[in-house]
Amino acid sequence: MFNKELYGLTLTNEIANEMFPNIVGATFNGDNSFLATLRALLAPRMKKKEHISLNVKVRNDRDSSLRDYSDEDIVRILSDGIGNNTIFVCGFNGTESSITTSFNKIESHFTQVYPKFTELEDLHVFVAKQANVRFYINEEEKSVAIFVACLNTRIWHFIQSLISRLVPWYFAENPINEEEKALVKALTNRYAPEYERIIEEFASKYDFRTAQIQKLLGGFEARAKQRQLDVVKNEIANQQSRIERLMADYQNMIENMDNLRIKESGLAYQIKEAGNDSEIVDYFVCNRHINPIYVDNQHIKIIVGTTIENYDPEMYERMTKNSRSYLFTGYNVSAEAFYEEAARKKLLDAVFGDEPLLKIKVRAYYDLDMRGRVDTIQRYDYPMEYNDYLTNPHFDFHACIGNNRPLIDQLLAKGDYIAAIEQCVSSAKNLNLSEGSQTVAPFMGRLFTSSCKAVIQLPDGTSCTPTEAYNWLLSQEQENEAQEVEK
């Protein structure tokens, strides 16, 4: 029995794997001679639909790894790999005591767990001087189980020499011949050359070269033509897609042309009918709180002066109940009248409460691009006539027009300029109280500064400073109290 590990045998190369798909198997330490021997001896004897697999497992158990299992479970664990049409080789290569334990469990319980198997006791005795091996076969399911103590390369080769006994169902009608006997005898030799020579003689019976050529070149011309056909098909598909895109573009161009002609006619009619009058001129004349400051062929830049009217009363109510909200914190107060939180709350209640008496005047700048875009500028420098206004904080701090922007853009693109300006006015009236630290707090800081101008609008339409508005509220309360006393 030789210990040389054999690799790269012709009967186990890539082409052989394709020629013998029904005879497959694993290696031991990379040695694939067992598979080569199986193919040499069994390929001529097996029918087309028959197959066989060589499974190999090497266990390196310690006693502790098997201690907690029953005898039957240990057998099942050690036999994991047995199957129909299979040669299962299991090597016990663990500690000496675990090998003894494993063999004892196999000897005493294997045929109880697998009653269809029969032990080849004569083979066990025959190989006893060479190795400690137990052989079991199941002729009904064409299954073989081999258990080896201290499996090594020598024993691996020796077991192969017993193939005719291990799978007798393949040799019953066609006994092993002299040439095959020479092959299995070579497996028991001390050195490998004789086996290597004979196994290659068996390989020479098969036309591996033709199989290799067929694998590499078979259908080459057809595949080449197929690739050319695929290229042509792809080009046809690309051309078809291009035609469809061009047709779609053409249809869009026709529709755009029709729309442009309609727009052209409409504008021409409007110009003809407008004369010296203009709807947008009348609009600005009538709405004194909106001032155009720059106009060219594409842009109208305007300033809106209005009051805060769009806010969430419920949000305000919740915030006033929390003295730490940004209505009262997060900013400096320099107006003496508002040092106390109660004074600030009184003024804010008159602006945002259930029955508002006062309004905060705000200003906002817009750049309207007639092609469909509205913009503003952060920290815009307003003319002196707007000194008595606070800049809407969303515009001043963030250059944010808010949710009105998409609608303004749409209206500009449609040419509905007056509606777009109305939306600008609506956005200027907005105050989002939920933007506490970003918007509300700095806005309150400007409202309660000592330098704040007349940004509060009284019910009669006049304007005054926040301090004056606060004093007005106090005087109104006093008047109401006096009237109650008189009653």
Image (cartoon, rainbow, N blue to C red):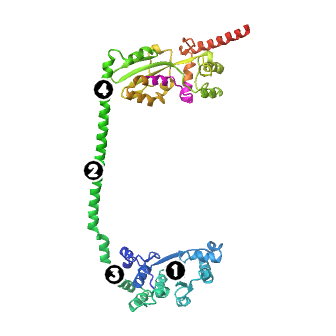
State whether the magenta stretch is mostly helix, strand or loop: helix
Mark 2 near mark 4, Cβ–Cβ under 8 Å?
Answer: no
Based on the displayed image, in which of its 4 quarters is residue 258 positioned? Answer: top left
Residue for badge 4 = 265
Q: Secondary structure at mark 4?
A: helix
* Residue 82 image offset from top left, x and y in percent: 53, 77
Q: Amino acid at mark 2?
A: Gln
Q: Amino acid at mark 3?
A: Tyr
**Mark 4 Cα-neighbour bin, 10 Å: few <14, some 14–19, many ≥20:** few
* Residue 321 image offset from top left, x and y in percent: 66, 27
What's the mark number on residue 206? 3
Mark yes or no: residue 451 visible.
no
Q: Nearer the viewer, mark 2 or mark 4?
A: 4
Q: Nearer the viewer, residue 422 or 383?
A: 422
Residue for badge 2 = 239
Q: Which residues are magenta?
A: 421-442
Q: Nearer the viewer, mark 3 or mark 2?
A: 2
Q: Nearer the viewer, mark 3 or mark 4?
A: 4
Q: Nearer the viewer, mark 2 or mark 1?
A: 2
What's the mark number on residue 357? none
- Dot placed on the residue nearer the N-terminal end, 2 or 1: 1
- Dot placed on the residue nearer the N-terminal end, 1 or 4: 1
The alpha-carbon separation of the residues under discs 1 and 3 comes to 32 Å
- Dot placed on the residue nearer the N-terminal end, 3 or 4: 3
What's the mark number on residue 151? 1
Count how many numbered circles sit on residues in the image.
4
The alpha-carbon separation of the residues under discs 2 and 4 comes to 38 Å
